[in-house]
Image: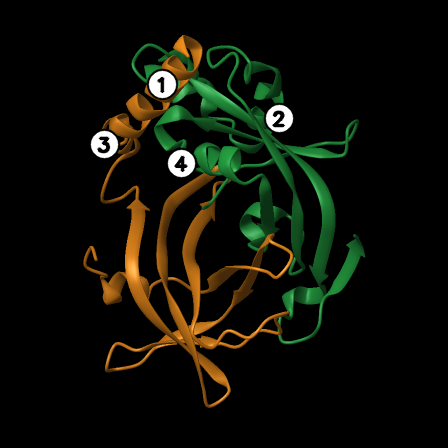
Chain colours: A green, B orange
Amino acid sequence: MPLLPFYLPDSGKFVVTSSILFSKKAENVKKNPKVSLLFSNPEGSHAGKHAVLVQGIAHADDTDLDHGWEKYLSFWRKKEPYIDAYLAEREKFGWFWKRIVLHVEPKKIIAWKNGDTSRTPEEFGA
Amino acid sequence: MTSLDYQRLGNFTYAVITLVGDDGFPFSVSTDFKILPDKKIVLQKPVLPTKLDGKRVNVLFNHITGLPGGGYGERRYMLVWGTTHEEHGTLRFEPKSLSEWDEKILPFDQYCAKSAPQGAKYLGTLQASVEA
């Protein structure tokens, strides 16, 4: 699924926040925490033509659906500045703002230089 | 399956194949694709750690347009589950099921309203775990 991940340099983890409206991924993580994040679209990844796959272990935190995600709002705002307009209508989009926080701890990184997936990728970590 | 609109599918420029690897992790890789006149979907075969003949995979067709002020517009995707078959050095993709969103067809607020049952389901599961 298309996602909006945030990288947390202090922990080396990625974070995705997901509305309960689109919570299938969180349900899946609870059943099986092995996940991957693919950064392959230059429009979104800002990694040029390169493609990077991060495989890791995910944890779904839904202990505070109303406020637990707010600490990542500054990351979100940088990627989607218009999010404040939706936030101003928090009541209208009530369940959109009930959000699960998914932490992803990277275990292996696989990279395709220039996005050339016809060649064997480089692997980092294990 | 929900009807796959091949005309809209043809407007995407690339595909992402995802399968479960031997280590249990999802493995995703982007590739090119084309739709033949007989509606066969043919994926360019990427280098993969596992054989794809007869493998159940999902294929994501995704588009976003970066906006000058930041963020994205023209968001749309088709996530198609199906089976891949190795043929003539390529992968023929046989679609089985589909989920999709195109904000031009279903505006975001309506998409949220349509997704309310999933939200209710999730809250119901949380409530059940609290009561258990």
Q: Is residue B19 above or below residue A86?
A: below
User: Viewer-proximal residue, B18 or A6?
Assistant: B18
> Mark 1 is on which residue type?
Leu
Q: Amino acid at mark 2?
A: Phe
Residue at the far left: name it: B3
Q: Mark 4 sits on what residue?
A: A24
- Quote the CA–CA distance across marks 4 and 1: 12 Å
Q: Label 4 to label 3, Cα distance in Å?
A: 14 Å
Between disc 2 and disc 1, the foreground one is 1
What number is the disc on residue A118? none
**Residue nearer the viewer, B132 or A85:** B132
Q: Is residue B57 above or below residue A80?
A: below
Residues at discs 4 and 3 in contact (Cβ within 8 Å):
no
Secondary structure of the residue carrying tag 4 is helix
Q: Which mark is residue B123?
A: 1
Q: Which residue is mark 3?
A: B114
Indicate the amino acid at tag 4.
Lys
Q: Secondary structure at mark 3?
A: helix
Q: Is residue A7 above or below residue A2?
A: above
The amino acid beneath tag 3 is Lys
Estimate the x, y position of residue A15 in percent, counting from the top left.
Answer: 62, 31
Kindly state the secondary structure of the residue where label 1 is placed: helix
Residue A75 marker:
2
Say if residue B105 shows up in the picture. yes
Chain at numbered mark 1: B
Vertical order, B55 against B64 (above or below): below
> Which of the two discs, 3 and 1, sits closer to the camera?
1
User: Among all residues in the image, which is located at the extreme bottom?
Assistant: B88
**Residues under numbered marks 3 and 2 in contact, where contact means CB atoms less than 8 Å apart:** no
Q: Residue at x 48, y 41 (%)?
A: B67
Mark closer to the observer (4, 2): 4
The chain identifier of the residue carrying mark 4 reads: A
